[in-house]
């Protein structure tokens, strides 16, 4: 599935709050990206504000009039469910006391099919049921999405800058017979801010884990991660 360009930093998560430098007398420069990059109809998509110059108000338009009042949001980091597959031109207008600025990005939403389609940024695990993607931002504000490399049916890794440099390893295990859940494990060799997203394409359930920028990657060992995915 196509993924969206990622600009600036993960300010919307507060991961860069300690590094944000106030800009006096300047309107925001609006920007955002969405997770997961593997977006499917009926599953939530999280939009993360990455605007610079300290916006204080946000207005989102999801280009989805069929969703009624949910077509807009004033949250900084909203979630939206697109009921039907298609291309949506999502727009964010960021505002502060000095003015406003808008940014628009094309969001591709696929049909809710019971399998994952692997691509350069998506791991498809456990019989192509679970789609795993990553987004990152470094301490020097370089941002992007991880490049996916499959290892086994249940595991794979992501590199960020160089194909020879492993950054994140991820694994999804079937623990249904043990505790009624699919388990998510992840380890990393990075101090980047990272969002790891796992989507169950059968039930359209989403799981996310976040690593704070500047902190050595905290391992994910969640044996309750997908506790509604079992039969």
Image (tube, helix red, strand yellow):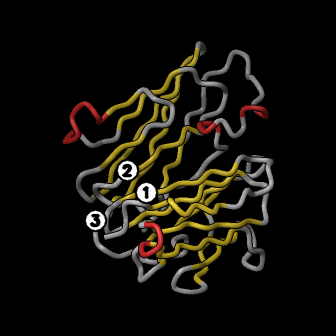
Q: Residue furthest bottom?
A: 152
In the rendered structure, the answer to whether residue 223 lies left or right of residue 60 reads right
Residue at horizontal 28 percent and vertical 65 percent from the top: 112
Query: Looking at the picture, how far across and down is residue 146, in whole percent?
Result: 63, 66
Q: Please tell me the numbered disc located at residue 206.
A: 1
The image shows residue 116, relative to residue 56, as above or below, that is: below
Closer to the N terminus: mark 3 or mark 2? 2
In which quarter of the view is residue 171 placed? bottom right
Question: What is the crowding at mark 2: few (fewer than 14 residues within 10 Å), some, or many (at least 20)?
Answer: many
Disc number for residue 30: none
* 3D distance between C-alphas at marks 1 and 3: 13 Å
Residue at x 25% of width, y 30% of height: 69
Q: Secondary structure at mark 2?
A: strand
Q: Secondary structure at mark 1?
A: strand
**What's the residue at 71%, 46% (across, down)?**
212
Q: Based on the displayed image, in which of its 4 quarters is residue 121 positioned? A: bottom right
Tell which residue pokes out farthest to the top in this image: 97
Q: Are marks 1 and 3 in contact (CB under 8 Å)?
A: no
Indicate the position of residue 51 as horizontal and vertical percent values: 60, 35
Residue 199 horizontal side relative to residue 121, left or right: left
Mark found first going from the N terminus, 1 or 3:
3
- Within 10 Å of disc 1 (Cα), the crowding (few <14, some 14-19, many 20+) is many
User: Can you tell which mark lies on residue 112?
Assistant: 3
- Is residue 206 shown above or below 21? below
Callout 3: helix, strand or loop? loop
Q: Is residue 125 above or below residue 142?
A: below
Q: On the image, numbered disc 2 is attached to which residue?
A: 44
Q: Give x and y (percent) for residue 119.
A: 49, 76
Q: Nearer the viewer, residue 10 or 100?
A: 10
Q: Residue at x 55, y 63 (%)?
A: 223
Tell me, yes or no, whether the two marked residues, 1 and 2, touch with CB atoms within 8 Å.
yes
């Amino acid at each position: 599935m196509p993924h969206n360009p990622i600009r600036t930093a993960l300010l919307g998560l507060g991961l860069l709050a300690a590094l944000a430098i106030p800009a006096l007398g300047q309107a925001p420069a609006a920007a955002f990206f969405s997770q997961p990059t593997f977006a499917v109809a009926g599953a939530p998509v999280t939009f993360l504000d990455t605007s610079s110059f300290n916006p204080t108000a946000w207005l989102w338009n999801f280009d989805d009039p069929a969703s009624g009042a949910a077509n807009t949001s004033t949250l900084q980091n909203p979630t939206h469910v697109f009921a039907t597959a298609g291309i949506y031109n999502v727009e964010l207008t960021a505002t502060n006391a000095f003015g406003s600025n808008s940014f628009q990005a094309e969001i591709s939403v696929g049909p809710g099919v019971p399998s994952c389609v692997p691509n350069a940024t998506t791991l498809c695990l456990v019989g192509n049921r679970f789609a795993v993607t990553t987004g990152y931002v470094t301490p020097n504000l370089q941002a992007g999405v991880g490049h996916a490399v499959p290892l086994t049916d249940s595991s794979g890794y992501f590199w960020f800058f160089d194909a020879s440099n492993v950054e994140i390893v991820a694994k999804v295990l079937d623990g249904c017979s043990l505790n009624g859940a699919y388990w998510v494990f992840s380890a990393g060799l990075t101090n980047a801010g990272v969002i790891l997203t796992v989507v169950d394409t059968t039930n359209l359930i989403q799981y996310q884990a976040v690593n704070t920028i500047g902190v050595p990657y905290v391992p994910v060992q969640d044996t309750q991660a997908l506790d509604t995915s079992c039969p």
